[in-house]
Image: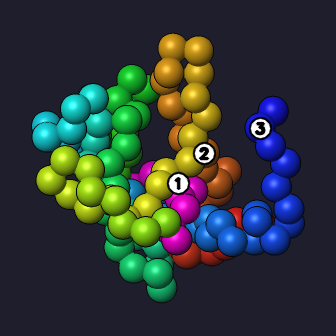
Amino acid sequence: MKNEISWEDFSKIDMRVGTIRTAEVFTAAKKPAYQLTIDFGAYGIKKTSAQITQLYTPAELIGRQIIGVINFPPKQIANIMSECLLLGCVGEQHEVTLIQPDRAIENGLKIS
């Protein structure tokens, strides 16, 4: 287990539901990744890079709802500015299984 955080620390993380609108192979990335655009409703459409190529194809990702952190500062990844972070569980072989709602819900809803 990592260091404990306070409830105040946790409340600073803005996790929201979004829907993946586009997904394509991110050829400029150093490690295998996809470049995604995600619709977070009232919080806008955000770009990111995700190393989720072991378990997903771009076609499988489009239309899938995910959970993302939207209040990190933008980060340069190869030739794009990443504006959010997808949340997933990392397996023993470093494969990432995305965390997602179990039913369709409104984009932008807060995770708490």
Residue 87's disc is none
Q: Is residue 26 above or below residue 110?
A: above
Q: Which residue is mark 3?
A: 2
Taking the spot 84% from the left edge, 48% from the top edge, the residue there is 4
Which comes sooner in the sequence, label 2 or label 3?
Answer: 3
Inter-mark Cα distance, 2 to 3: 20 Å
Instruction: Indicate the quadrant where residue 46 lies.
Output: bottom left
Taking the spot 81% from the left edge, 33% from the top edge, the residue there is 1
Secondary element type, mark 2:
loop
Q: Which residues are magenta?
A: 63-71
Marks 1 and 2 close (CB-CB < 8 Å): yes
Instruction: Report the front residue among 106 and 112.
Output: 112
Mark in the foreground, 2 or 3: 3
Residue projecting furthest to the bottom = 42
Residue 66's disc is 1
Taking the spot 43% from the left edge, 61% from the top edge, the residue there is 84
Inter-mark Cα distance, 1 to 2: 6 Å
Secondary element type, mark 1:
strand
Query: Crowdedness of circle 1 by 10 Å Cα count: few (<14), some, many (20+)?
Result: many
Q: Residue 48 at x, y = what percent?
A: 34, 56
